[in-house]
Amino acid sequence: MRPTTEPQRLRVTFVKGEEVKYISHLDLMRLWERALRRAEVPLLHSQGYNPRPKISFPAPLAVGITGHREILDVMLERPLAPLDFATAVNRQLPVGVTLVEVEEVYATLPALQTQVQGAEYLATVAVSEDTHQLEERITSLLGSDQLPRQRRGREYDLRPLLEKVWLETQEVGHYVLGMRLRAGEQGTGRPDEVLDEMGLANQVKSIVRTRLYFSPAGEE
């Protein structure tokens, strides 16, 4: 039986909804830190002059994008039943942030930030063209050898970060596009930049990150 003083690592899956889609990643981290403190869960803190709770996110979510299955890991000083954790924390979360799942994972697993490999998104765009024209945009994008871009004054190639783009659904007045983008040491693909390359930046109605995926050690 595990000693009661052994730290515990909980993996939290949550929704970042419309009500909070315009807050920054830093504000989201602060939101979670406040909620966890108010829930009085036994947070494990870092050492040093400015101890911080050990909370980690695998990949920031850009402002204006919602998330269906966002993830964070929380380290606790001592074991706590996932259901008890969820019950206590859920009372402290604001409208727009909803717990989906809490599970225990091995405390010795590598940090999520080092294991994330990419993400999938759904983007709703308002376009009047027919399906054939939109599929031509996708074919042209994926057929490009390079997609040179600039981000924060630095040049990079978007093409290696673009794994897959597809037409998810068609409805009256708009389409839903799916995309799978890579993330890691080589860079992180952003859905808004993909849509810009397709000439659809001004027609975007919404973007949602539907899932993150990880290397096997990250326990997707």
Image (cartoon, rainbow, N blue to C red):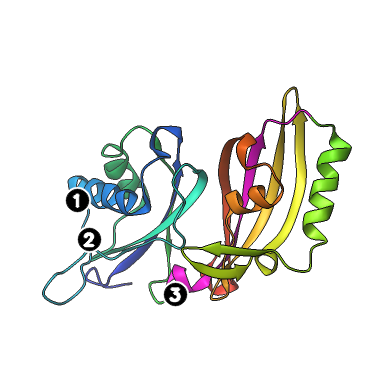
Residue 106 point in image, percent of width and height: 42, 71
Q: Which mark is residue 43?
A: 2
Residue underneath mark 1: 37
Q: Secondary structure at mark 2?
A: loop
Q: What kind of residue is marked 2?
A: Leu
Residue at image coords 77%, 31%: 170
- Residue 67: where, in percent of width, then height? 50, 45
Q: Secondary structure at mark 3?
A: loop
Residue 122 image point, x, y percent: 64, 43
Q: Which mark is residue 109?
A: 3
Mark 1 packing: few (<14 Cα in 10 Å), some, or many (20+)? some
Q: Which mark is residue 128?
A: none
Q: Is residue 12 toward the left or the right of residue 182 in the image? A: left
Q: Earlier in the sequence, mark 2 or mark 3?
A: 2
| Residue nearest the observer in this picture, 40 or 172 | 172
Please report the residue visible at 28 percent of the width from the left and 62 percent of the height from the top: 79
Q: Residues within 10 Å of mark 3 (few under 14, many from 20)?
A: few
Q: Is residue 114 magenta?
A: yes
Q: Is residue 220 visible?
A: no
Q: Amino acid at mark 3?
A: Leu
Calculate the distance from the C-alpha at mark 2 to the C-alpha at mark 3.
Answer: 18 Å
Give the magenta part as a residue range. 109-128
